């Protein structure tokens, strides 16, 4: 692989730029790769990591599987538009992705899988789309809860559930009740959730406790804040180890703003309906390649 890559790079640098106007910066970088010790090896690794052949299956370290994975599921609308379908077709297909990713996360030993299902800002979307989204939990849980029970997966939800339409709230609460005795992976849905709203609610709750003399102001610390946030229902896995966003967008969209202080971020170009169990493994593989120091130094 290295020899073929090096031959290609040398041909490109020595010949191709004579026929086409190659950007000087690109030309310089290619030459640097060729002269830098180990540069060709690095370039080869980048090429190989771009696509894994059937023979090159990823091998994950079972001891370093992230305990809590949070996913911003993005790209449903664009997936549908690329196929000249209505946006709701993307949302419907996305349910099958949720099932596949849930199964794989559970198989790998993930403790909590949090899925950003519907944000407090999503109410701004067209009413027809919102109505369709609000109906999805009914269909989803009716078909998936029996499997969740069988696989010992517990359903949890964070967000302003009481503000959901009655049929949606009932479907969510019914799924939580039906899986309450399960003690395996937690499938956590962030629905009608917003990070700023959650922090706002937490501040008001702590302020009320201080006002009612239930809490001294000197007792307010990181631990108290963490305990007052919605994700306290996930303890001891309140904070995600790995945050994934699909569709190529690079932003947080008001998701778990306090909790992701030390999360590793992976931004995938894959649209959520195209996301697979293998994609999840690739993202975890990238996570495992990083050195998490939490503000400290790597131990020698």
Image: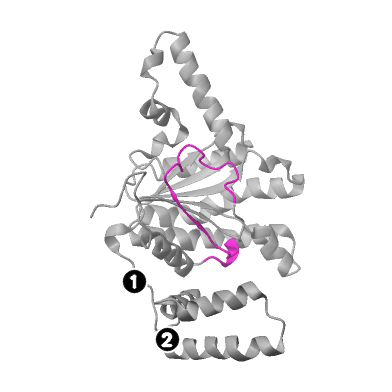
Look at 76% across and 68% down and name the residue there: 84
Q: Which residue is the site of mark 2?
A: 2
Residue 272 in the magenta stretch? The answer is: yes
How is the protein colored in the picture?
Answer: one colour
Is 165 placed above or below 283 here?
above
The answer to whether the residues at label 1 and label 2 have Cβ atoms under 8 Å apart is no
Identify the secondary structure beneath mark 1: loop
**Alpha carbon of mark 1 to alpha carbon of mark 2: how far?**
22 Å
Is 186 placed above or below 83 here?
above
Residue 212 or residue 216, whichever sits in front: 216
Residue 299 visible at all: yes
Dot 2: within a 10 Å radius of its alpha carbon, few (fewer than 14), some, or many (20 or more) residues? some
Magenta range: 251-275
Residue 255 or residue 117, whichever sits in front: 255
In the displayed structure image, the side of residue 258 where residue 22 appears, left or right: right
Q: Residue 228 location in percent, x, y?
A: 43, 27
Q: Residue 231 location in percent, x, y?
A: 44, 37
Look at 50% across and 75% down and name the residue there: 50
Residue 1 visible at all: no
Identify the secondary structure beneath mark 2: helix
Residue 267 in the magenta stretch? The answer is: yes
Dot 1: within a 10 Å radius of its alpha carbon, few (fewer than 14), some, or many (20 or more) residues? few
Q: Which residue is the site of mark 1?
A: 59
Q: Residue 137 location in percent, x, y?
A: 57, 48
């Amino acid at each position: 692989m290295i020899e073929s890559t090096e031959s290609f790079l040398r041909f490109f640098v020595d010949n191709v730029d004579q026929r086409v106007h190659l950007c000087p910066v690109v030309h310089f970088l290619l030459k640097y790769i060729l002269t830098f010790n180990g540069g060709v090896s690095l370039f080869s690794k980048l090429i190989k990591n771009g696509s894994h052949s059937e023979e090159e299956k990823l091998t994950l370290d079972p001891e370093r599987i992230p305990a809590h994975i949070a996913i911003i599921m993005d790209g449903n609308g664009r997936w549908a538009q690329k196929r000249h379908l209505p946006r709701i077709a993307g949302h419907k297909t996305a349910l099958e992705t949720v099932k596949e990713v849930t199964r794989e996360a559970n198989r790998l030993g993930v403790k909590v899988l949090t899925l950003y299902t519907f944000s407090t800002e999503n109410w701004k979307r067209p009413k027809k789309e919102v109505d369709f989204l609000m109906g999805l939990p009914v269909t989803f849980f009716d078909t998936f809860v029996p499997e969740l029970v069988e696989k010992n997966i517990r359903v949890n939800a964070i967000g302003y559930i009481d503000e959901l339409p009655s049929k949606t709230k009932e479907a969510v609460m019914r799924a939580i009740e039906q899986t309450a005795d399960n003690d395996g992976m937690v499938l956590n849905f962030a629905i009608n959730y917003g990070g700023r709203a959650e922090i706002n609610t937490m501040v008001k709750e702590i302020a009320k406790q201080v006002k009612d003399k239930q809490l001294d102001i000197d007792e307010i610390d990181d631990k108290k804040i963490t305990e007052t946030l919605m994700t306290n229902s996930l303890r001891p896995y309140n904070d995600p180890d790995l945050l994934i966003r699909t569709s190529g967008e690079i932003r947080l969209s008001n998701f778990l703003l306090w909790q992701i202080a030390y999360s590793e971020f992976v931004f995938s170009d894959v649209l959520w309906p195209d996301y697979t169990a293998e994609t999840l493994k690739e993202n975890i593989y990238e996570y495992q390649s990083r050195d998490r120091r939490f503000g400290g130094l790597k131990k020698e």
